[in-house]
Image (spheres, rainbow, N blue to C red):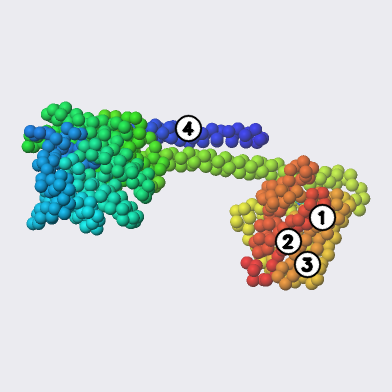
Amino acid sequence: MNPVDHGSKRTRIILIYILGVVIPGVVLGFMAYRGIRSDDALREKQVRQELNLAAQDFFQLFNKELADWSVDTTFSPLVLYRDSNIRIVKNQLLYLPGKFLTDQGNGMLNAGPDRGWELEFLENNLEGAKDFFVNKLVGNDKGSSAINARCSLARILRKQGKLDDALKEYQKILLLNPTENIGQLPPNLVSALEIVKIYQSLNDTAKVKTGIKDFSAKLLNPISAYNFQTFDLFYSELQKLKVNIPKADTVFKLLDQAIQRTNHLNKFLLMADEYLAYPGNQLVYMPKNGYRDLLVTQRVESGEIRAALVDLNRMIDNRLGPLIKSADAERHYSWKIKEDSGIVLFNYVKPGVTSLLPFPFPNPLPGWQVEIQINPKPFFKALLESGKGLYAGVFGLLVLWLIMGLIFTIYLLSQELRLSRMKTNFISNVSHEFKSPVTSIRHMSELLKLRRVRTEEKKDEFYDSMIEQCDHLSHLIENILDFSKIEDDIRKYHFKKIDPTDLIKNLVDVHRNRSAESGLDFNFSVSGSIPQVMADQDALRQVVYNLLDNAGKYAAGGRRVDVNLSATDKEICIEVKDYGRGIAPADQKKIFERFYRVDDAQNEGIKGSGIGLTLIKRIVESHQGWVTVSSELGMGSSFYVYLPIDQSLAK
Ligand code: ADP
């Protein structure tokens, strides 16, 4: 067989592999891929459905809550009732439009001036006026008329310079938390302001400060209803006190925000008639000046119509989180709520979650949408649950398997082809090795038969040569037979005590004679005393013969071969050192492999079969020994065979 045949054989096998394994694998893979794709589409549909359900659940909760929010004054700054008259439930309003104040809090003004008032202002009789109001308070120190009287009393005490007494009276008024005005004026604001002024005249700075704090808090959280003018009166008083207010900027910022909000809500209040005219439920989204208010009008059970303005900003801050928590207790999803302007009102998106699906809010919030996506699950859970991960994994494994299969096949194939090539070479090498001794024997025997060899001396020489050639032939045959026995593991060894010195010396002599003509000298030396070893005599002869034969073949130019025998406590060492061509490091590892011969070009036509060193290695190892080589290209080689002395080792 020539290399072209090997090449086509390899191509054929690879082709069969591709047809039988790779193509079906790829087809299967493709089908799996298609499967994954359609599975993907199915999953996407399922996910969309799941998210839609989650969104609908949330909307349901939201709407239910909306109904509650519209009566909850925490979220509804304004609730208006229309029965016979418009009734306002107010919250968060600093002042009301005058229209809503006509019949509120003017009781005292309508009652007209009384005797105390005459004494104080017309007759300038402060003591008399004081007595009048003190008497008025006897047995009646609560209620609006009592508060009115106490205010007058405090005022008179102040005029009289009895500041401590005046203070006490104003403080009593504050404790009563009056919700009715005294002629447009809210008594709690009046009292708080008067307290500040008294402390100012007493030069008590600390008390002034706490007093102002209390006053501004009362201005921000009115407990009675009054109009803008009244509010503004107290607001400008507060501004006059500005220098004494700690963190004045924050206080005024808060107040200004509240003023703006109040103005916004008052505009709405002024349209209350229109809103309350609608009989049915209706929801109107009125985003304005950053306020997000939702108007809800509905007929309540009693038949009244109610309109509530729900403060969505408050709701977003306080209620959306808990609401989503109750809609998605196990936190399966990421949530985002957006307004049509694109402003994100609520964001609870896990890092890494993208492509959220939008679902529009049902009325009453046109333009609002909730965006949801399923949160990623832990890697292995997700892999098991999603067919995709599993398919992809299996597909990846399949591809890996095919590639590994291909690599493995190519590797095995190359090994097999290499061995087969070596075997082919082996046969042709052996034939060549046999051919020259056979030809030479035939030639000599022909000459002898034709009696061309005249002298007895010459005849002896011919006979010796023929015997030597036959010996060599039988050695070659032995090598081959032993090799096949060793390969089949049926080589038997007969161990006995052997003196290695004699054995080696004889073989060195034989080789010295053989190569006398080529001028190669074989030297043998012994270092120290050499013990006997347990060995198979024929096998050991073969080892040494092959080593010497190789030295004769490959180191002919080296003129000398040194054979040395030495021993340590544990082993003997046979060293065969030549000064020939040497062996390249890469080849040193391979020469012990069966059939391996260094490139023919390097061996330069030297005959051989590539099993000599393999045999040496196997035999030595069967003797529990080992063989090594050290060599340098162009300088020569040394082969070392170590055999243990410990006789129990020999089996
Ligand atoms: P063979 O000698 O029949 O080819 P071996 O197994 O004895 O087979 O040797 C294997 C190869 O090792 C040889 O082909 C040769 O190239 C190389 N080799 C062995 N001994 C020597 C040596 N003393 N010097 C250089 N090369 C050697």
Asked if residue 24 lies left or right of residue 593, the reply is left
| Marked residue nearer the N-terminal end (4 or 3) | 4
- Secondary structure, mark 2, is strand
Is the residue marked 1 within 8 Å of ligand 1, measured from its CB?
A: yes
Which numbered mark, 4 or 3, is in the foreground of this view? 4
| Marked residue nearer the N-terminal end (3 or 1) | 3
How far apart marks 4 and 3 lie (CA) works out to 63 Å
Image coordinates for residue 130, horizontal then vertical, percent: 15, 53
Using the image as rendered, state which of residue 89 and residue 402 is in the foreground.
89
Residue pointed to by mark 3: 566
Residue pointed to by mark 2: 641
Q: Is residue 99 above or below residue 351?
A: above
| Marked residue nearer the N-terminal end (2 or 3) | 3
- Residue name at image x 71 percent, y 53 percent: 613
- For residue 56, say whether it is visible: no
Q: Is residue 546 above or below residue 433?
A: below
Which numbered mark, 1 or 4, is in the foreground of this view? 4
Residue type (three-letter) at the residue carrying disc 2: Val
- Residue name at image x 35 percent, y 45 percent: 242
- For residue 422, say whether it is visible: yes
How far apart marks 4 and 2 lie (CA) works out to 53 Å
Residue type (three-letter) at the residue carrying disc 3: Ser
- Residue name at image x 47 percent, y 32 percent: 23
| Marked residue nearer the N-terminal end (4 or 2) | 4
Residue pointed to by mark 1: 578
Using the image as rendered, state which of residue 260 and residue 141 is in the foreground.
141
| Marked residue nearer the N-terminal end (1 or 4) | 4
- Secondary structure, mark 1, is strand
Using the image as rendered, state which of residue 465 and residue 566 is in the foreground.
566
Residue pointed to by mark 4: 23
- Residue name at image x 65 percent, y 44 percent: 423
How far apart marks 1 and 4 lie (CA) works out to 57 Å
